[in-house]
Structure formats: C-alpha cells, structure tokens
Amino acid sequence: GAPGGAAGGNPFGGAAAGGGGNPFGGMGGNPFGGGGGGMDDAMKAAQQAMSNPKVMAVIQKAQKNPKVMAAVQECMGNPMAMTKYMSDPEVGPILKELQDAMM
C-alpha cells in the first residue's frame, strides 16, 4: 500500500481513483490534490497532461484495470517508477502510450 494518509506523503491525496470524473481524485482543480514545495513544475506538467484529450483517453483505458491504474498513478508521482513497469506486458504499453500522448 501507499505510505501515509491523505495528502501526507501520498501524491494523490488519498482519494479513490475515478472520484468525480477526475482519475486522480484531486481537489480544487489540482488533479493531484496538493503537494509540497518543489512540486510546482510536476504539478504544472500534470495539469497540462490532464487537459490533453489524448492523455485522458489513455488514463480512461488504464482505469479499466486496477493494476495498470495503480502503476500509472505511481509513475505520475514518481517518474523513476516507470522503468520497473516498462517490461510489464499489461502496464508497459499503457505507459508508452501515455508518454507518447504527453510529447
């Protein structure tokens, strides 16, 4: 499981995936529900990604598989995590699609 409770150490604010049409269950227009200093650039990138229809389409596809969605969320919070999922037959293709959509 993820360390910490809501917002504290959890980049997704602890809300359930898919809450209120927002795949990351964020709050107040921020798809990741807050975050400390130094996260600003990541937040901007995340918000830009969320406003990209191609990215949203991939996220919606990922939501159909809880394992894939969990991996996508982990990678959004920690881009270094992508390396461990790229070889996964279920998760890898979705992450690749997500990267392509963000380019």
Image (cartoon, helix red, strand yellow):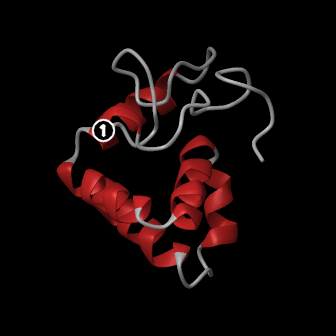
The single residue placed furthest to the bottom in the displayed view is 89
The quadrant holding residue 49 is top left
The quadrant holding residue 27 is top left
Label 1: few (<14), some or many (≥20) within 10 Å? few
Query: What residue appears at the point 53 percent right and 46 percent down from the top-left corner?
Result: 76
x and y percentages locating residue 5 in the rendered image: 74, 26
Query: What residue appears at the point 41 percent right and 65 percent down from the top-left corner?
Result: 64
Relative placement, left or right, of 83 versus 54 is right
Closer to us: 103 or 16:
16
Asked if 22 appears above or below 72 in the picture, the reply is above
Q: Amino acid at mark 1?
A: Gly
Which corner quadrant holds the C terminus?
A: bottom left
Q: Does the image show residue 57? A: yes
Number of numbered discs overlaid on the protein picture: 1
Q: Which residue is mark 1?
A: 21
Query: What residue appears at the point 61 percent right and 80 percent down from the top-left corner?
Result: 88
The quadrant holding residue 60 is bottom left
Which secondary structure, mark 1?
A: helix
x and y percentages locating residue 55 in the rendered image: 29, 54
Asked if 41 appears above or below 65 in the picture, the reply is above
The single residue placed furthest to the left in the displayed view is 53
Closer to us: 75 or 18:
18
Relative placement, left or right, of 53 versus 67 is left
Relative placement, left or right, of 93 versus 74 is left
x and y percentages locating residue 51 in the rendered image: 23, 38
